[in-house]
């Protein structure tokens, strides 16, 4: 696999992990304690990483809400 292929693969994996963490946050309220990260740059990077997952979950819910293949059960 080429370097670009590996880079795309790792980026997709990172987005999936971020989306899973966003789902855990929404269903349980548990999230990473980013306020405990001392380095500002690392903390900002982690917050952006988590924000990507939130965006992916929001977009997925938006699509699923309008699709006839999904229904809401309560």
Image (cartoon, rainbow, N blue to C red):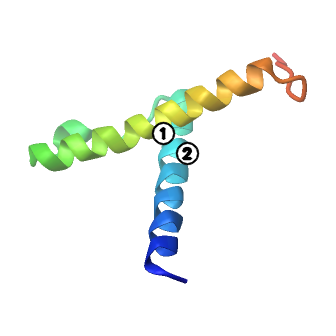
Instruction: Please report the residue visible at 57 percent of the width from the left and 26 percent of the height from the top.
Output: 58
Residue drawn at 48 percent across, 39 percent down: 53
Picture coordinates of residue 46, whole percent (x, y): 29, 45
Reading the image, the residue beneath label 1 is 53
Residue 20, compared with residue 62, is above or below; it is below
Asked whether the beta carbons under mark 1 and mark 2 sit within 8 Å of each other, the answer is: yes
Rendered view: 34 above or below 9: above
Q: Which mark is residue 21?
A: none
- Judged from this view, the residue extending furthest toward the left is 39
Classify 10 Å Cα crowding around label 2: few (below 14), some (14-19), many (20 and above): some
Residue at (46, 56) in percent of width and height: 14
Question: Which sits earlier in the primary sequence, circle 1 or circle 2?
Answer: 2
> Marks 1 and 2: which is nearer the front?
1
- Secondary element under disc 1, as helix, strand or loop, is helix
Q: Which quarter shows the N terminus?
A: bottom right
In screen coordinates, is 74 left or right of 34?
right
From the viewer's perspective, is 61 left or right of 56?
right
User: Helix, strand, or loop for circle 2?
Assistant: helix
x then y, percent, for residue 21: 49, 43
Asked if residue 30 shows in the view, the reply is yes
Reading the image, the residue beneath label 2 is 20
């Amino acid at each position: 696999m080429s370097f670009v292929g590996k880079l795309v693969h790792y980026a997709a994996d990172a987005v999936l992990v971020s989306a899973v963490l966003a789902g855990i946050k929404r269903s349980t309220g548990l999230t990473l304690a980013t306020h405990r990260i001392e380095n500002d740059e690392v903390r900002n990077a982690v917050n952006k990483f988590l924000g990507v997952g939130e965006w992916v979950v929001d977009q997925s819910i938006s699509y699923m809400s309008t699709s006839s293949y999904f229904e809401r059960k309560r």
